[in-house]
Amino acid sequence: MGATMIEKIISNNVGKEAKAGDIVTVSVDRVMIHDIFIPFVAEKFEEMGFTELWDPDKVVLIYDHLIPASQVDDTRHFNAGNAFAQKYGMKHVHRSDGICHQLMTEAGYVKPGNIVFGTDSHTTTYGCVGAFSSGIGYTEMASILGTGTMWVKVPETIKVSIHGRLPENVMSKDIILKLIGDLGADGATYQALEFCGDTVEQMSVASRMTMANMAIEAGAKCALFMPDEKTAEYCEMTLTDKERSLRADEDAAYVRKITYQAEELVPVLACPSQVDNIKPVKELAKTEIDQVFIGSCTNGRLEDLMAAAEVLKGKKVAPFVKLIVTPASRSIYRQAAANGTLAILAEAGAMITHPGCGLCCGRAGGILTDGERVVATNNRNFLGRMGTSKVEIFLASPKTAAACAVAGKITEA
């Protein structure tokens, strides 16, 4: 029996064959800690009796959720992070460079075949470059910081094949929302989602990143895209034979197989207040909205901002509708400024903010109140995430979100 992609990655790491269901101890290639969790990680690390990091060069600390501070207690997290980094010789600290999941691949911390853990559920994002990445809690993180190892159960795999050419108004966000709707919020619990097909091959790494990011919304342990030349270009590397071999064997065993024909896909929304409550945009047409948010680790990349700008060019945001745009990193901000994207968005009436998590986690401006509706490009629409529990959050692609901002109501691009 052949091996799935996740089985190959873990087998390479442990130096022996690993099959779904096996429990193994892996050597960790990189970890990411963000500002929300660093005080708890630091406390637990010292409580466990560790006196040094297993490898300071493999630890990345990123301030993104609480930047800029919007509550007095936020500064405690920054101080705790600074003290921990200084005490243990951490070199990789990003204090206002962007969102953790964008920076981890953008800055070259994650490569194909790596095993990476982070203190955020959307750490699944790094599967876009063919890495096994998953979110963990602060106790597990503290243990890794001291030992460099982590035990895992090798996940079973769901194979998702997508073939054909996407319609112009359909983005990878629509694909992953469709999949989450079909699987359900717990339909892939502790399983790997392995994406393949010629539609996937045509996708940019940024589009793959969107899909890997939201795999956790179906309960997945990780999401994986096979490394290719686009991966190599994005990671600024030449793929080795070992990295090129990170593709599933034809006779690999899957717990389930799902196939989509791209031409049949349509723009969709995740409706309040569950990510698997998926409906075609057309079914909700003319629903009035109060705000649009374009950004987050799901859809704050350059291609996302450019897609929104293409819809908004020469148009204006509807009266009484607020449009907030948050690039995922400083680098993306600079690129979008240089190629005129930010100018188009600003001319249309967008409020452009500093890179960070911002409204996605209900911080740093833009929260809403009872009875208001927002169309957003982030990954979760749970009650109370963007304001009060009576705010209605609809998740959409950047193209759909931009079209809604112009119309002042839900509509297709």
Image (cartoon, rainbow, N blue to C red):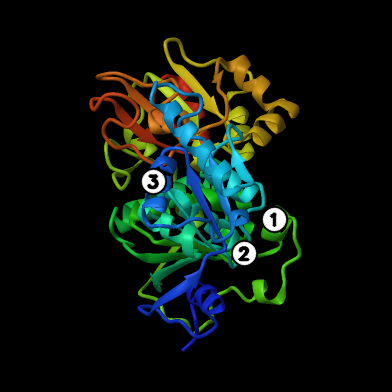
Q: CA distance from mark 1 to mark 2?
A: 9 Å
- What residue is at 38 percent from the left and 44 percent from the top? 40
Instruction: First in sequence, mark 2 or 3: give its number.
Output: 3
- Marks 2 and 1: in contact by CB < 8 Å? yes
Q: Is residue 140 left or right of residue 316?
A: left
Helix, strand or loop status at disc 2:
loop
Residue 286 visible in this rendered orientation of the protein:
no
Q: Quadrant of residue 280?
A: top left
Which residue type carries mark 1? Cys
- The amino acid marked with disc number 3 is Glu
* Residue drawn at 67 percent across, 27 percent down: 341
Compared with residue 296, is residue 2 higher up or lower down, i.e. above or below? below
Picture coordinates of residue 300, whole percent (x, y): 55, 36
In this rendering, the count of numbered labels is 3
Q: What percent of the width, then of the height, locates residue 296?
A: 49, 36
Q: Please tell me which residue lies in front, 299 or 402.
A: 299
Q: Secondary structure at mark 3?
A: helix
Above or below 105: residue 243: below
Classify residue 45 as left or right of residue 353.
Answer: left
Quadrant housing residue 160: bottom left
Q: Earlier in the sequence, mark 3 or mark 1?
A: 3
Q: From the top left corner, tell me how far across and down residue 62 is, in percent.
A: 54, 41
Of tags 2 and 3, the one toward the viewer is 3
Amino acid carrying mark 2 in the image: Pro
Q: Mark 3 — residue?
A: 43
Distance Cα–Cα, label 2 vs label 3: 32 Å
Q: Which mark is residue 112?
A: 2
Mark 2 crowd level (few <14, some 14–19, many ≥20, 10 Å Cα): many
Q: Which residue is mark 1?
A: 235
Direction top: furthest residue = 319
